[in-house]
Image (spheres, rainbow, N blue to C red):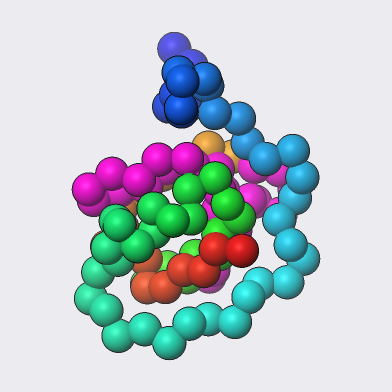
Amino acid sequence: MAFTPPFGPQGQQQQPPTAPPPMTPPPKPMTSTLAIDPGAITRCLFRNTYIWPRNGQGFWFYPIFVGRTSISGFRWNGFFWMFSGFDLNRIEAFTCV
């Protein structure tokens, strides 16, 4: 069974962006939070967002859903957008452009 991404406003199925993200990542913001507030990252819905995870390298993400403890959307793998999701507590910092 194939996975279908969530539905967005007016029940339309959300599609990945049609263009790649910016070539260079934005500067990492200075943070001292223990967890990312869902309300804060909600302002990045449907926008190119750079995410710095607690472990690993940063990446471009295009969020289409923010829940109480998780986020889902499309992650840029260097060649195309792939649907993915992860826990908000795994995010150290983020910036949307």
Count of marks, rendered view: 0
Q: Residue at x 48, y 55 (%)?
A: 44
Residue farthest along the top direction in this orientation: 1
Q: Which x, y percent locates residue 64?
A: 47, 40
Asked whether residue 12 is in view, the answer is: yes
Task: Specify whether 60 is left or right of 43.
Answer: right
Frontmost residue, 14 versus 39:
39
Q: Residue at x 63, y 50 (%)?
A: 76
User: As displayed, is residue 42 above or below residue 50?
Assistant: above
Residue farthest along the front direction in this orientation: 10
Q: Which x, y percent locates residue 22?
A: 74, 62
Q: Which x, y percent locates residue 35?
A: 25, 69
Q: Residue at x 63, y 36 (%)?
A: 16
Q: Residue at x 58, y 52 (%)?
A: 47
Asked whether residue 4 is in view, the answer is: no
Rendered-image quadrant of the N terminus = top left
Task: Specify whether 34 is left or right of 66.
Answer: left
* Residue range of the region highlighted in magenta in the rendering: 56-81
Dominant SS in magenta = strand
Rendered-image quadrant of the C terminus = bottom right
Residue 12 colored in magenta in the image: no
Q: Quadrant of residue 6?
A: top left
Q: Which x, y percent locates residue 33?
A: 27, 79
User: As displayed, is residue 39 above or below residue 65?
Assistant: below
Residue 60 colored in magenta in the image: yes
User: As displayed, is residue 52 above or below residue 80?
Assistant: below
Task: Specify whether 79 is left or right of 54.
Answer: right
User: As displayed, is residue 83 above or below residue 21?
Assistant: above
